[in-house]
Image (tube, rainbow, N blue to C red):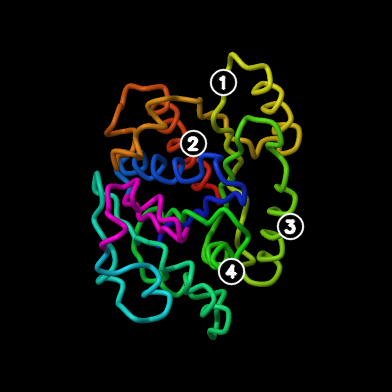
Amino acid sequence: MGHIIAVINQKGGVGKTTTVINLAAFLKKLSYSVLVVDIDPQGNATSGLGVDKQHLKGSLKELLFGEKALDQVVLNAVDGISLLPTNQELAASEISLVNADQREFRLKEVINSCNYDYIIIDCPPSLSLLTINALTAADSVLIPVQAEYYALEGLGQLLEVVQLVKSGLNPNIELLGVLLTMYDKRNSLSEQVKNEVKNHFGDKVFTTIIPRNVRLAEAPSYGKPISSYDKWSKGARAYLSLAREVHKRTAYL
């Protein structure tokens, strides 16, 4: 099994799912095998990879509860990316998960047998039991941070949760990096936030910065990563750079 990355931020609208989809797409273009695990009940990574989340033959929820086998649920999504899809049924089933045996390890058990170079988990925008499952299964954490006011709000709590998981459930988990997203070089606030993030996280901040880009925002509505929707856009160039940087960093973890 390859490297497992949990992409997480409990704040919504920071480019989390966009990062999952496009990082996966460009790692695939760099000839690595990639599985996206959608553990967010909103299912945005599922639809963003061109899969109709309302008509799934099997979903991650059934895997977590042992109702289906892995090969019954994994889909070949757009551009050859493999996907464990999700829809809103996962939200209701999380209540049942609370009383399940080994509840924090259910996702880890599911993906233990997966043979991919990279497994990228799209986490919910909350610090829920599903998020704990993702952190327990992951080798590293990637945190997207929006280049806007209150960017660092809540990150302390998130890092505390990661540390608790590290001390109790998954001693091997590491912070892969912090990714600045929705950056607008014309906006002085973006520059201020960039400096603030670098002051807090130092060399854990990715060199790559994801710009605010219309084509990047449009791509999910067409069920495509930016590599297919507009491979010459600024957003595409940024995510290609991130894929290379992620590969370089994971080689040392």
Would you name the residue on which mark 2 appears? 245
For disc 4, the neighbor class at 10 Å (few under 14, some 14 to 19, many from 20) is: some
Mark sitting earlier along the chain (2/4):
4
The image shows residue 197 at horizontal and vertical percentages of 70, 33
Q: Secondary structure at mark 4?
A: helix
- Quote the CA–CA distance across marks 4 and 3: 15 Å
Q: Which mark is residue 129?
A: 4
Residue carrying label 1:
184
Quadrant occupied by the N terminus: bottom left
Camera-nearest residue between 167 and 61: 61
Mark 4: which amino acid?
Leu
Query: Marks 1/4: CA distance?
Result: 34 Å
Label pair 2/4, CB-CB below 8 angstroms:
no
Report which residue position mark 3 lands on: 160
Tell me where the magenta segment starts and ends, as one range. 33-55
Amino acid at circle 2: Glu
